Amino acid sequence: MAKDEPKIAPPTGKLGVLLPGLGAVATTFIAGVEAVRRGAGLPIGSLTQMGTIRLGKRTDSRMPLIREFVPLADLDDLVFGAWDPIPDDALKSAQTCGVLKESDLREVEDFLSEIKPMSAVFSRDYVKKLDGPNVKKGSKKELAEQLREDIRRFKDENKCERLVMVWCASTEVFLKPGPVHQSIEAFERGLENDDPGIAPSMIYAYAAIRERVPFANGAPNLTADIPALHALARDKKVPIGGKDFKTGQTLMKTILAPGFKARMLGLSGWFSTNILGNRDGEVLDDPESFKTKEESKLGVLEYILQPDLYPELYGNLFHKVRINYYPPRGDNKEGWDNIDVVGWLGYPMQIKIDFLCRDSILAAPIVLDLALFFDLAQRAGMSGVQEWLSFYFKSPMTAPELYPEHDIFIQLTKLKNTLRWLMGEAPITHLGTEYYDDYYRDV
Ligand SMILES: NC(=O)c1ccc[n+]([C@@H]2O[C@H](COP(=O)([O-])OP(=O)(O)OC[C@H]3O[C@@H](n4cnc5c(N)ncnc54)[C@H](O)[C@@H]3O)[C@@H](O)[C@H]2O)c1
């Protein structure tokens, strides 16, 4: 083992997964984990459960499952808790969201009906299209204290050894970093003064970090991506990350765009539009919440294509993203992409994509992997922003001087090399000259 590699504490005991938001994504995730535990389904889409990792040379034939290579918490050891302003238990919420079929829910209904949301830190100032009675009262500082008490009580009552928090709640209105976000002191003063720059999601993140609970953000909200919480996380030795689960259309973008760029094919336009009819779609129908989502979705191509380096290929790209709330489709989103491609001598071509996807079916395995990897990171002593988990996010958090890496293949290489490094295995560079040195020595 090299000397800079961390020692990893074993994943003993129960891991509590705390979810602000008990809507479509959260209930599909919880129901799915329970179904897998009962042998009623497969965890498709989860790298931690289904993925393998190559170790050593290509000729070594060492390809263990990731979950057998790194010490991850076992699915049987997961327990779930949530907060939501809507008081429905996980069964009722799953039925309302309508992602999973009644017959699938019936398999796990006893389990789901036991999960009742704790009262939420929620304000309509930050999510305009939603309301619910299950809400805490108090100043922002008091709300943070109440969340910290919830966290401690949950840990005690469920006899958890460790906890992680994954934000699965609605997208908040667009916020820009301001003075209150710049330092821990300014942030804590802001909590005392009820500063409007502190959104509910930031109060959850703050409470989690203070309780030394890793925090991952599945929505595009600013939340923990502010200097104050970056610093607090480092100070308290807590891993944090985000933002916005990479599912659906952006997943496709980060798969396709690196391919076009790899072959030096130009792009003159990329128009993306969606229809979806779930509660998330309704929340995003508010222009201020949509703005948060739009910023998160738009950045992807700019960073992958690097128009500054390739002005002839990508300098005039017209990129547009629309999301339209259309209730008849429920959670089954339809995403259309029209891509205007430019080839040899400037000849235009078009690609059309029609992705009939299921949003929460794509998001649920991401929640699982994030919970397990953030727990691993903490046991390995990794703290602050976890850029190696960018693979899961539309708008990855990084150190301020870095641009985010969006190319999904680079993200996967980074993730797997981090796992190799954690376990004392050599990183894989794909150089591979040694195979040919050996071959030509022998022929
Ligand atoms: N499904 C996907 O593919 C996907 C992809 C990327 C990001 N996301 C994000 O994940 C989040 C969840 O998506 P969803 O489809 O489950 O939405 P949803 O509307 O079904 O669920 C969100 C839940 O959060 C609750 N909520 C809102 N504010 C809260 C607060 N302050 N505290 C606690 N609970 C709160 C709502 O009452 C609701 O039950 C959204 O922000 C969405 O943008 C989803």
Image: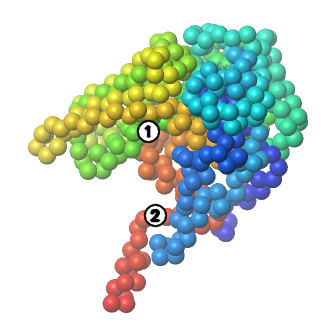
Pointer 2 residue: 429
Pointer 1 residue: 251
Is label 1 or label 2 in front? 1
* Residue located at (75% from left, 13% from top): 135
Residue 225 position in % (x across, y down): 59, 30
**Which amino acid type is shown beneath numbered disc 1?**
Leu
Mark 1 and mark 2: Cα distance apart in space: 24 Å
Residue 29 position in % (x across, y down): 63, 36
**Which amino acid type is shown beneath numbered disc 2?**
Thr
Q: Assign ligand 1 to one image quadrant.
A: top right
Q: Residues within 10 Å of mark 2 (few under 14, many from 20)?
A: few
SS at circle 1: helix
Q: Quadrant of residue 171?
A: top right
Q: Is residue 332 or residue 242 the one in the foreground?
A: 332
* Residue located at (30% from left, 50% from top): 262
Q: Compared to 138, does 365 lie above or below?
A: below
